[in-house]
Image (cartoon, grey):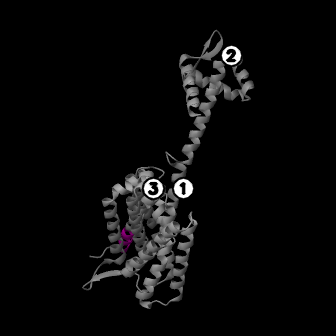
Amino acid sequence: MMLSIEFEIVVVIILSAITCSIPGAFLVMRKNYYAADTTNRSAMLGIAVALIFTSYLSSPLVIILGSLTAGLAMMLVKKIKQITSFRGKGLSIIISSAFLCFGILAASNFSFNQSSNFDLSIIYLGETAFTYFNRVRVFGVDIGSYALYAVSIVLIINIILVTLYYKEFKIDGVDKTYAASIEKKESTIDFLLLIMTSLSVSVSFQTAGIFMTTAFILGPAATALFYTKRLITLAFVSVFISSVACLAGFGLAWPNEVSISGTIVSFIGLLFIVSVIFSPEMGILKKYFDNLTSQKRLEEYIIMDILNSSKIDCLEKNINENISSSLNWKVMKVSYIMNKLKAEKKIEIVNEKVQLTEEGRNILNKFIAAQHCFY
């Protein structure tokens, strides 16, 4: 029994996004962002060469050669860094761009079998709707789209590798100094991430395209990083975010007949921007209000210190004007802070003079001691 075209496409999209987000979570945790882009660009050469020989997007050779060229580029970058003084991200950009250009030349200058219905834009930008038409048949029986099985197999491989080597991933993600001191484990992690990322890029190119697969890999994980620092939680949140973006993107793109992968990547970007602004731990608004709160608290401590040191006339009737004149603040601002301190029982009026309460004095002393410890 065949699945409906909409349902099968949605399943392929979600599985592709999850497949990419798993290695993406570990790359983001290691702050190795360029690895995804390097792998992504370099896979173009292998995919193009495979299509020259096979003419079919559904050929396993597409995934194999795409993964090999992606892995070759990463190993080449690492080897050149070991034998030369070339450092930084520039080397990754140069090598991946070279692989990408060779791939584009190969794809543009060779004729493919017309029966493959091949279009170069599928490699560049991806088109998920076309994955439905590459079918797998066993003894003449249609058992589903090729992309569904290919992505599922790579997803299973990623899950198995993460399960078997989770301890190594966790050590590298939590204590990088210790991980770096164990050369065997560090090389194991590099090799595993290379396999996972290369396979994920190669199998997902038809869904998201070479240029947008990077967003599939890094986008959900980078968004999840605003909500958690724990490795396993980061991976699950990445999967959740990628699934939500896929459902929302498909729901908008399908009835409007626009690019499905482009819409999904747009939703991933939107979720990232929303997280940047509204994240409860690291968002811009959170930091803004924290800074605002810190500033107001500092202003309270300044006034409390003035009252404690008796640097000005503390008579109740003209205290606000005296503090305002001393600090060059508006009287209304000083009055607001004084009322707040009084409500919090940090100041009191004794013999028509304003002074700190015992609680207020203790709070001020703790603040001053903390500043001395800090400096």
373 is higher (above) or lower (below) than 104: above
Read off the residue under disc 2.
Answer: 314
Q: What residue type is labelled 1?
A: Ile
Viewer-nearest of discs 3 and 2: 3
- Left or right: 190 as drawn, with respect to 83: left
Counting other residues with Cα less than 10 Å from the Cα at mark 1, is it few (<14), some (14-19), or many (20 or more)?
A: some
Quadrant that contains the C terminus = top right
Residue sitting at 60 percent across and 38 percent down? 292
Question: CA–CA distance between discs 3 and 2?
Answer: 55 Å
Instruction: Residue 280: give x, y in percent of width and height.
Output: 49, 45
Quadrant that contains the N terminus = bottom left
Whichever of labels 3 and 2 marks the residue nearer the N terminus, that label is 3
- Left or right: 193 as drawn, with respect to 356: left
Q: Nearer the viewer, residue 133 or 191?
A: 191
On whether residue 367 falls in the magenta region, the answer is no
Per the rendered image, the range of residues in magenta is 4-12
Counting other residues with Cα less than 10 Å from the Cα at mark 3, is it few (<14), some (14-19), or many (20 or more)?
A: many
Read off the residue under disc 3.
Answer: 29
